[in-house]
Image: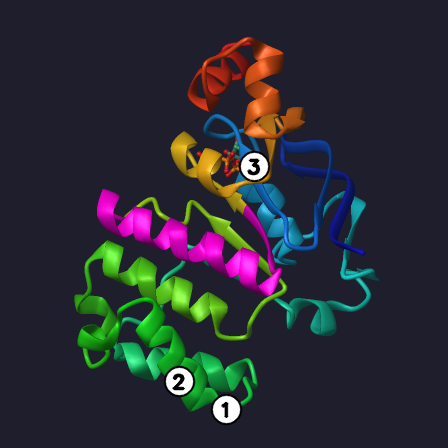
């Protein structure tokens, strides 16, 4: 069964067509990247999948159920992290994770929070208020929060954008291991081509609201006669 089947999505903001007839599937255990230049329509696509905005047309089916008609059941099985989403700054890290664990009705919330604190090495930060954290530290809290409900689909908008190379590398390893162990699917956007090559099974390139190419990093490099994904990106983005 597909985790996500998005069909012929269209979203306009006034005169701007942000997403123009995009179809996309994510299978069980698959890590899929949406790549493309600034303004290509990646975040808008993710926001429709997350039910944050409603498509003008097209359909989104998650776990075999139409998002528009089964919102609560479907959304309880997914989660999201993005550096541009703020966590409550006046709360301490452990308070944020406890609050979200309760909100998501996580079973054994204390144990789950403790697991994620360990996984993301948040122990030394647990008593710090979120507003005092660096952006990279906040990213780790965001990712821990996003995994609280053991999502079957994890949607990540530029997950490692604020992390230093060492932290980024460790988080990438962690996320890849999670996808392999739990079979949870991921849909991510990133401007880091090495990250995408390392983490993603399949890549969909967007340009001007359309998916213009898709395949594995290797397939795309072969198709475009490119050395690597960075070169593919430049070729696709520059038409
Ligand atoms: N709420 C909005 N109101 C008006 N225009 C919007 C809105 N959200 C997005 N857009 C426009 O839709 C287009 C696609 O934006 P989107 O954020 O999806 O791009 P993106 O591929 O995620 O870009 P980036 O790589 O810069 O994050 C852009 O032209 C953007 O200006």
Distance from the alpha carbon under mark 2 to that under mark 1: 11 Å
- Residue 225 in picture, x, y percent from top left: 55, 8
- Mark 2 vs mark 1: give the one in front: 1
How many numbered badges does the structure rendering display? 3
Q: Horizontally, is 129 left or right of 40 in the view? A: left
What's the CA distance linking mark 3 and mark 1?
A: 34 Å
Q: Is residue 174 above or below residue 198?
A: below
Q: Nearer the viewer, residue 16 or 155?
A: 155
Residues in magenta? 163-187
Residue at x 45%, y 14% (from the top left corner)? 227
Sequence-first disc among 3 and 1: 3
Is 183 in the magenta? yes
In the structure shown, which secondary structural element does the residue marked by tag 3 occupy?
A: strand
x and y percentages locating residue 5 in the rendered image: 77, 48
Q: Main secondary structure of the magenta part?
A: helix
- Quadrant of the rendering where the C terminus is positioned: top right
Looking at the image, which residue is at 62% across and 22% down? 219
Q: Residues within 10 Å of mark 2 (few under 14, many from 20)?
A: many
Q: Give residue 98's mark.
A: 2
Q: Quadrant of residue 118?
A: bottom left
N-terminal-most mark, 3 or 2: 3
Q: Badge 3 is on which residue?
A: 34
Quadrant of the snapshot with the N terminus: bottom right
Answer whether residue 77 is visible to the viewer in this image: yes
Give the image location of residue 155, x and y in percent.
55, 54
Where in the figure is residue 73, as x and y percent of width and height?
73, 73
Q: Earlier in the sequence, mark 2 or mark 1?
A: 2
Indicate how the structure is coloured in the image: rainbow
Q: Is residue 234 above or below residue 194?
A: above
Mark-to-mark CA distance, 3 and 2: 31 Å
Identify the residue position indicated by label 1 in the image. 108
- Residue 84 seen in render: no
């Amino acid at each position: 069964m597909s985790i996500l089947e998005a069909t012929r999505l269209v979203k306009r903001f006034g005169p701007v067509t942000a997403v123009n007839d995009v179809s996309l599937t994510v299978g069980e255990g698959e890590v899929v990247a949406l790549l493309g230049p600034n303004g290509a329509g990646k975040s808008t696509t993710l926001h429709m999948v997350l039910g944050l905005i409603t498509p003008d047309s097209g359909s989104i089916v998650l776990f075999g159920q139409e998002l528009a008609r089964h919102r609560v059941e479907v959304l309880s099985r997914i989660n999201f992290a993005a550096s541009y989403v703020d966590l409550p700054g006046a709360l301490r890290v452990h308070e944020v994770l406890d609050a979200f664990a309760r909100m998501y009705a996580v079973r054994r919330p204390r144990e789950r929070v403790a697991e994620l604190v360990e996984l993301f090495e948040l122990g030394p930060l647990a008593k710090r208020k979120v507003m005092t954290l660096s952006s990279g530290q906040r990213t780790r809290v965001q990712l821990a929060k996003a995994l609280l409900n053991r999502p079957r689909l994890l949607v990540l908008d530029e997950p490692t954008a604020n992390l230093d190379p060492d932290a980024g590398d460790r988080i990438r390893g962690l996320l890849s291991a999670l996808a392999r162990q739990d079979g949870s699917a991921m849909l991510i956007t990133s401007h880091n081509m090495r990250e995408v090559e390392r983490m993603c099974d399949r890549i969909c390139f967007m340009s001007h609201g359309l998916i213009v190419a898709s395949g594995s990093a290797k397939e795309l490099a072969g198709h475009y006669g490119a050395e690597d994904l960075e070169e593919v990106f430049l070729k696709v983005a520059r038409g």
